[in-house]
Every structure is written in C-alpha cells, then in structure tokens.
Image: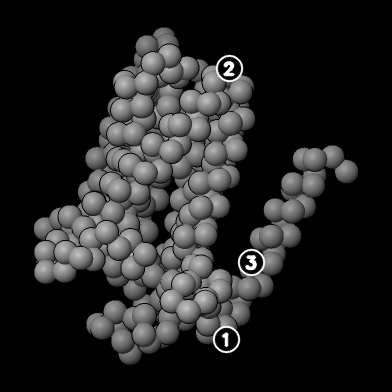
C-alpha cells in the first residue's frame, strides 16, 4: 500500500473514531475534561497541547514548502519563533483590549493567558507584524514579506482547525441553544447565565473547525496547482476564512463586541474585502 493510501486510511479511521466519540459527548453521556493529566496545581491542558501540535504540524509543512521554493529553512526556524512570541502576545492584547472593562480592575490577570482569553484575529495581526519585522530587520532573508504572508495564509487554517478542539475540551466557543440533531450538551457550570436553563447548544467550535480544514484543503490544492504570484494565498485565506467566521460568529454566545457589532464579524468583513480586492488586482496584473 502506497503512502497516499496509508494517509487516506488513517484520515478515514480518525474521522470515524472522532464521530463515535462525539456521539457520546454531544448527548452528555461523556463529560470531557479540560486537561490530559493533573499533578498538584499543574495541568497539562488539551487547549495548549492542541495549539502546540497545530504549530508543530504547520512547521513541518512549512519546511516542505521552503525546500520546494529553494528558501533557507534556517530562516523559517527564526521566523517561526518571532511569529509564535509576537502572535501570542498580540492575540492576548487583542482580547484584553475588548475586555478592558474587566482587566482594568484586574490588571494582574492580563499576562495570565493560562486562564483563557486569546483571539485568533489578534494572533493573525501578530503573525503579520512578526513577518514584517523579520523581513525588514534580518539580512539576507530568502523570502519576501508577502511570500511569508502566503505561507501564513496557507497554514493558518490548519492550525486554527486543530486549535478549535481545545475549545471543545474547555466547553467554550459554543453557540446559542438549539434542538438540532447535532446539538451539544454543555454542563451547567459552563453555560452563560442567560442560558442557564438550557442544556444543548450549537457546537460552533466544530462548525469552524470543519470550515478551517476545508479552507486548508482548498488552499493546498491551489498552492500545488495554481499558485503563481506572491499575495495570492494570503488574499484567498482572508476571503475564505472570513466567510465562515462571519457565519459561525453570529451563533456564538461569547463574542467580543465593538460597540453593538461583533468584533470578529467586523474584522472578518474588512479582511474579506481587502483579500478579494487584493486577489482580483493580482489576477488583472497577469492579464
């Protein structure tokens, strides 16, 4: 059996096992824990483990892409370190900014990201900042700023899709109550106060995870067969991811707000317009 079929079988089996597992969790027959194991005050949490796994998987795929393009993989290692540090910092800063009414009275909580509270859009902005700083400050970088953004655009949805399962184990990022067949049971301790008497909710973490994997699959096909100009991948990511985020965000109960507008929807709408205009401009240059 070739490697291709081994991968296909592994993916199919994984999907079946996940389906069986969710069939027990969603009705509430199994209550999941936020941690893998605990020793004293230390907890190895699913959320951080899955994020780390997503970053690691993205790293190996990025190495393959760097070799394919003839870029130095040493530059990837350094850029990744910059991206992780700046990305996490910006993801936290974004969340704190929109929850300032709480953090202004609890400033000691600001650096405690292990208590929860990072935002993907902040992380995305941080990754862009990291790549810009790296390509501007480092000498002899083998890729340009925009080419670096394309790598982010291709791999970001894969990491996001994996990371969303951390929300699942934390019983967070779920949606409003529902009676749909795929409804998800949420323990009372995790329910918003206004929905305390409801038991089942939209599994919006799952909606977005599936969408993220679809976006990654589309971009993978694109990067293998159609990618020609720097900027195409990041532009397509901004369009495709934003479309799904606007829809799933409308169902969530824990949105960050910018006035009377959900911040994630506003950010996604702007990103989608910028991405679409950018991609169309690149195609016009080709003609």
x, y percentage for residue 273? 28, 35
**Disc 2, SS:** loop
**Disc 3, SS:** helix
Query: Which residue is the extreme one toward the front?
Result: 40
Q: On the rendered image, what quadrant is the C terminus found in?
A: top left
x, y percentage for residue 85? 37, 44
Residue 91 lies left or right of residue 30; in this view the side is left
Q: Distance between the residues labelled 2 and 1?
A: 51 Å
Q: Which of marks 2 and 1 is nearer the N terminus?
A: 1
Q: Mark 3 points at which residue?
A: 18
Q: Which residue is drawn at 42% across and 84% down?
A: 187
x, y percentage for residue 11? 70, 53
Residue 159 lies left or right of residue 82; in this view the side is right
Q: Name the residue under label 2.
A: 70
Label 3 Cα crowd, 10 Å radius (few <14 / some 14-19 / many 20+): few
As drawn, the label of residue 254 is none
Q: Which residue is drawn at 53% across and 50% down?
A: 54
Report if residue 183 is visible in the image: no
Q: How far apart are marks 3 and 1 (CA)?
A: 15 Å
Q: Distance between the residues labelled 2 and 3?
A: 38 Å
Query: Which residue is the extreme one toward the right?
Result: 1
**Disc 1, SS:** loop
Q: Quadrant of residue 192?
A: bottom left
Q: Mark 1 points at which residue?
A: 29
């Amino acid at each position: 059996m070739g490697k291709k079929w081994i991968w296909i079988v592994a993916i199919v089996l994984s999907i079946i096992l996940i389906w069986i597992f969710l069939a027990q969790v969603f009705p509430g027959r199994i209550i999941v824990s936020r941690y893998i194991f605990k020793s004293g005050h230390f907890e190895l949490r699913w959320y951080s483990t899955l994020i780390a796994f997503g970053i690691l998987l993205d790293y190996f795929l990025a190495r393959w892409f760097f070799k394919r393009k003839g870029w130095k993989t040493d530059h990837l290692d350094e850029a990744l370190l910059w991206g992780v540090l700046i990305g996490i910092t910006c993801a936290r800063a974004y969340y704190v900014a929109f929850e300032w009414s709480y953090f202004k009275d609890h400033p000691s909580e600001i650096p405690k990201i292990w208590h929860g509270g990072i935002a993907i859009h902040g992380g995305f902005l941080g990754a862009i900042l990291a790549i810009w700083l790296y390509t501007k400050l480092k000498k002899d970088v083998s890729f340009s700023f925009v080419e670096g953004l394309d790598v982010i655009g291709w791999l970001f949805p894969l990491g996001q899709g994996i990371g969303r399962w951390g929300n699942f184990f934390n019983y967070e990022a779920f949606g409003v109550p529902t009676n749909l067949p795929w409804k998800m049971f949420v323990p009372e301790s995790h329910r918003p106060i206004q929905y305390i008497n409801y038991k089942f909710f939209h599994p919006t973490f799952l909606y977005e995870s599936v969408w993220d994997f679809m976006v990654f699959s589309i971009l993978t096909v694109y990067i293998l067969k159609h990618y020609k100009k720097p900027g195409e991948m990041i532009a397509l990511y901004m369009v495709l991811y934003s479309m799904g985020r606007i829809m799933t965000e409308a169902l969530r109960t824990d949105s960050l707000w910018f006035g009377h507008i959900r911040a994630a929807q506003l950010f996604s709408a702007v990103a989608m317009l910028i991405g679409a205009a950018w991609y169309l401009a690149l195609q016009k240059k080709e003609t």
